[in-house]
Amino acid sequence: MAAYNQEMFAKISEAMKSNNSQQSNIGNILRLKPGNTYSVRLLPNVKAPNKTLFHYYSHGWNSLATGQYVSAISPSTWGERDPIDEAKFRLAKHGSEQEKEDSKMLTRRENWLINVYVVNDPTNGENNGKVKILRFGKQLNKIIMSAIEGEDAEEFGHRVFDLSNEGCSLKIKIEEQGGFPTYVSSRFESPKAVPGLVNDEAINEIYKSNYDLESVFSVKSYDELKEMLNEHFYCSDPDEPTAPAVPESVATVSTPTASKVEDDDDIDYGPSSSTTKAESEDDETKVKEILASMDL
């Protein structure tokens, strides 16, 4: 198995920049609670560096039929049409005043997943020394990317993925601002040894413990999302859809505009355009180039 090195960092960094793209593992997500400070080490995917990070979009709201929270991954994660995005866009532009107000709950959120080695979890000590999945939004992403390729890259750079004594831990500090969590005080620490990471053998075992980030959430089809929308937003019989059809000219418009950001995860977007064949082939080429250059 290949060891982590500077060359691998370059491949991971490039894949993450280009990405800035079954619930078997959802229980392994690290639960972060406001008022606490967590310490983790970011883990590279040494077998497939381009899969070190999973960048995705999702929807979630309190059902108008049951009052329970419902959520789903948006097909726009893969450049596909999303009926929830389309409904929000149509209602916001052409709906009644009440429909425009109701459409605000159909927010699309942008998040990332990455495997981490937990150095310190102040709320659940059983997580310490284990591999978990860190789910984060735009604030933490900005801090991480700054350390990888931004103004902090000279100080941290490849060290953010290094589990040795030369590596840097990410200290995640969660505060509350206006009733919502904020992560702006989070930062990477200077290199230091971490208990449990005593030798190369132990470190390689941790590298092999990565979870498959793309299988964390179940994925609904376009029709299943329409049923979810009809049942929990329009409050209609799932077998009798009431959502008006969205004209093709509307469905393929891409107009991402940020609305009021209530917390690190609440980012509002317009409907997504479908990925073209050329774009898809270009992405596949990049992945193949990364994998072909890996020294495995």
Image: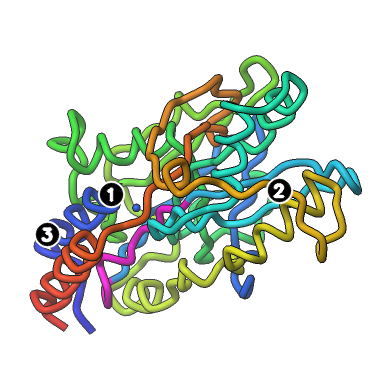
In the image, 134 versus 127, the foreground residue is 134
SS of the residue at dot 3? Answer: helix
Crowding at mark 2 (Cα within 10 Å: few <14, some 14-19, many 20+): some
Mark found first going from the N terminus, 2 or 3 = 3
Q: Amino acid at mark 1?
A: Val
| Residue placed under numbered mark 2 in the picture | 243
- Asked if the stretch drawn in magenta spans residue 47, the answer is yes
| Magenta segment | 46-56
Q: Is residue 278 visible?
A: yes
Q: Amino acid at mark 2?
A: Ala
Residue at 27% in and 55% down: 165
Residue at 21% in and 70% down: 284
Q: Amino acid at mark 3?
A: Gln
Which residue lies most toward the right here?
66
SS of the residue at dot 1? Answer: helix
| Residue placed under numbered mark 3 in the picture | 6
Contact between labelled residues 1 and 3, with CB atoms less than 8 Å apart: no
Residue at 54% in and 42% down: 38
In the image, 216 versus 159, the foreground residue is 216
| Residue placed under numbered mark 1 in the picture | 160
In the image, 192 versus 98, the foreground residue is 98
Mark 2 vs mark 1: give the one in front.
2
Q: CA distance from mark 2 to mark 1?
A: 47 Å
- Asked if the stretch drawn in magenta spans residue 68, the answer is no
Residue 16's x, y, as percent? 26, 53
Q: CA distance from mark 2 to mark 3?
A: 52 Å
Residue at 17% in and 58% down: 9
Mark found first going from the N terminus, 2 or 1 = 1
Q: Is residue 27 visible?
A: no
